[in-house]
């Protein structure tokens, strides 16, 4: 059997032996791009009922001491220990009330709650964490507990919020938030509500808002100049932007620096970084409003940022992240890797097996989501060499363009019929036989590009056309439970993320890897 035939047989086995396929033709698919699309339908009541039942079960079975702060529809539990900053309902008037909406990351709810519990007690933090299923009720109204929490909030944090009805509901309530509003990687309509002090992202009658001219000139230095690279360039700026803004005069620059520092902590992820972000915004609020023991509050030092790479490669046998695909492949084919596999009884695919680039969501990697390791093992077991690249989600196209190539593209370049982009990195790139994205969304822009579907289709199409290899989306459902998926298929926004948007780029045969069990991600090995 030749290499190409082995590849397609192997890919078929690797996908269908491990994950159940849901054909797009079996469901109604709609794409919702703007707040004016009134045809958006909410999730069914049975789905929300299941989520509620699982949450109750999870709460009852927890070994941690917990305190219920809200009614049963929320089932919000704060971890109580000796350092906890959780505040009783009666004491909220003297606390800093922060609402955090997890969006696509309900699996990180426990992490966020635990991070809030270790914020210094001087910060007087009252953190309330909500998943996307907590925002609306089964009768299509806004959940009363969530609405009251936002109405009384001193600060609001939201991430990965794209559902049309959720966006409408939250947008109507954000004006009630008294202090900072930090909205990361969400629908553009929500991103406009970002605000810290005098800095905001809304336009006004007096002209465009946002960074002052001096700051905008700094932001431009981190972009390649390509329209499709603006968002990924912005993430690079996060590393240095807050330090550079120290030298830009003006209150607006200072407030933008606070927003960037908060996003930098959030973007790096992990309990300690989330704790630092919560400390940053509560300290700022207390000092500005002269609330609490100001001397103690001002003396609190912010923890150092714990940095993990924005992009990298991983493997269950690899102790550290690989810096680029070429170095990863060199290690993966080495005798060292074979020896480790032998010691740990880990089955590897043959060195001459087809190679598949697997795009992974970085936050799933750094929060140690178990399915990532399982996924890599399944590829190896089915005779496919995985090249697992984790990304923030917005730079998938830069990985394909700069780090990946194919034999067809190599041949085309040598014959002069294909020209690569100037950003291609031959000393870091490797050749692959297929690309699998576990993220969904558009190839260009990822979650941040989902509200402008089709804008960068030509860019994505050209990249994939040049390589001419299969591009498959295979992802766990982050908004649906496994039982709900099995009974009703892929619903609502999840179908847009996995089917509609990737298909605009040319993705084929979307595969569902699994879904939520409570707030955790699980694969379905079928």
Image (cartoon, rainbow, N blue to C red):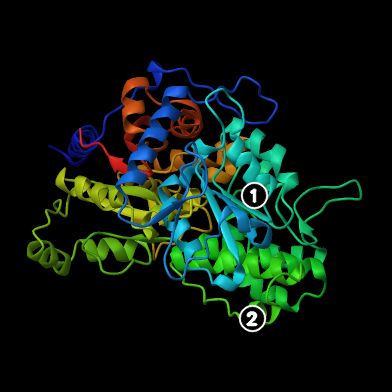
Kindly report the distance in space between the C-alpha atoms of the residues bearing marks 1 and 2: 46 Å
| Mark 1 / mark 2, whichever is N-terminal | 1
Where does residue 194 sit, x and y in percent of width and height? 70, 52
Label of residue 99 in the image: none
Crowd class of label 2 (few under 14; some 14 to 19; many from 20; radius 10 Å): few
Residue 370 percent coordinates (x, y) = 28, 52
Q: Is residue 115 among what the camera can see?
A: yes
Q: Residue at x 66, y 56 (%)?
A: 155
Q: Position of residue 462 (x, y in %)?
A: 51, 40
Secondary structure of residue under mark 2: helix
- Taking the image as shown, residue 57 lies to the left or right of residue 416, namely left
Q: Quadrant of residue 480?
A: top left
Left or right: residue 53 compared with residue 457:
left
Within 10 Å of disc 1 (Cα), the crowding (few <14, some 14-19, many 20+) is few
Can residue 475 be seen here? The reply is no
Q: Nearer the viewer, residue 332 or 190?
A: 190
Give the quadrant of the C terminus.
Answer: top left
Figure quadrant of the N terminus: top left
Residue in the picture at 70% in, 62% down:
220
Q: Secondary structure at mark 1?
A: helix
- Vertical arrangement, residue 93 with respect to residue 74, above or below: below
Q: Is residue 338 left or right of residue 72?
A: left
**Front disc: 1 or 2:** 2
Q: Residue 15 occupies which quadrant of the picture?
A: top left
* Residue drawn 41% across the image and 54% down it: 66
Q: Position of residue 354 (x, y in %)?
A: 22, 46
Q: Which residue is mark 2?
A: 296
Callout 1 touching callout 2 (CB < 8 Å): no
> Badge 1 is on which residue?
227
């Amino acid at each position: 059997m030749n290499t190409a035939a082995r590849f397609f047989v192997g890919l078929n086995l690797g996908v269908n032996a491990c994950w159940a396929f849901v054909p797009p033709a079996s469901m109604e698919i709609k794409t919702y791009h703007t707040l004016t699309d009134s045809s958006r339908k909410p999730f069914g009541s049975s789905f929300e009922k299941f989520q509620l039942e699982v949450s109750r079960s999870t709460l009852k079975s927890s070994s941690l001491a917990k305190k219920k702060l809200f009614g049963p529809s929320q089932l919000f539990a704060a971890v109580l220990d000796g350092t906890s900053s959780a505040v009783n309902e009666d004491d909220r008037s003297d606390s800093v009330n922060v609402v955090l909406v997890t969006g696509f990351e309900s699996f990180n709810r426990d992490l966020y709650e635990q991070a809030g519990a270790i914020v210094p007690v001087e910060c007087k933090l009252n953190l309330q964490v909500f998943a996307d299923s907590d925002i609306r009720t089964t009768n299509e109204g806004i959940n009363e507990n969530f609405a009251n929490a936002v109405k009384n909030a001193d600060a609001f944090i939201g991430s990965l919020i794209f559902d049309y009805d959720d966006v409408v509901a939250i947008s109507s309530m954000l004006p009630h938030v008294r202090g900072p509003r930090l909205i990361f990687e969400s629908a553009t309509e929500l991103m406009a509500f970002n605000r810290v002090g005098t800095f905001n992202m809304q336009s006004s009658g007096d002209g465009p808002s946002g960074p002052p001219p001096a700051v905008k000139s700094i932001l431009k230095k981190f972009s390649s100049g390509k329209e499709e690279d603006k968002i990924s360039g912005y993430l690079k700026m996060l590393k240095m932007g807050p330090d550079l803004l120290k030298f830009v005069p003006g209150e607006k620059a200072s407030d933008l620096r606070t927003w960037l520092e908060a996003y930098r902590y959030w973007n790096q992820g992990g309990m300690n970084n989330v704790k630092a972000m919560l400390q940053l915004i509560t300290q700022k609020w207390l000092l500005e409003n002269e609330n609490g023991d100001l001397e103690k509050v001002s003396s609190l030092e912010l923890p150092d940022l714990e940095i993990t790479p924005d992009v990298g490669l991983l493997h269950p046998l690899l102790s550290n992240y690989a810096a680029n695909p070429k170095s990863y492949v060199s290690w993966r084919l080495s005798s060292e890797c074979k020896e480790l596999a032998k010691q740990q009884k880990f089955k590897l695919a043959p060195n001459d097996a087809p190679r598949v680039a697997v795009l992974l969501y970085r936050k799933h990697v750094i929060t140690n989501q178990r399915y990532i390791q399982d996924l890599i093992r399944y590829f190896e077991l089915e005779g496919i060499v995985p090249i697992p690249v984790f990304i923030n989600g917005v730079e998938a196209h830069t990985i394909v363009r700069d780090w990946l190539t194919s034999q067809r593209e190599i041949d085309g370049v040598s014959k002069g019929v294909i020209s690569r982009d100037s950003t291609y990195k031959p000393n870091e790139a490797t050749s692959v036989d297929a690309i699998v994205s576990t993220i969904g969304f558009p190839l260009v822009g990822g979650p941040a590009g989902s509200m402008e579907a089709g804008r960068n289709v030509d860019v994505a199409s050209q990249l994939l056309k040049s390589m001419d290899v299969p591009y498959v989306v295979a992802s766990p459902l982050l908004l649906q439970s496994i039982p709900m998926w099995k009974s009703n298929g892929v619903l609502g926004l999840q179908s847009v993320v996995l089917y509609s948007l990737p298909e605009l780029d040319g993705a084929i045969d979307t595969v569902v890897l699994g879904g939520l069990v409570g707030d955790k991600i699980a694969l379905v090995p079928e």
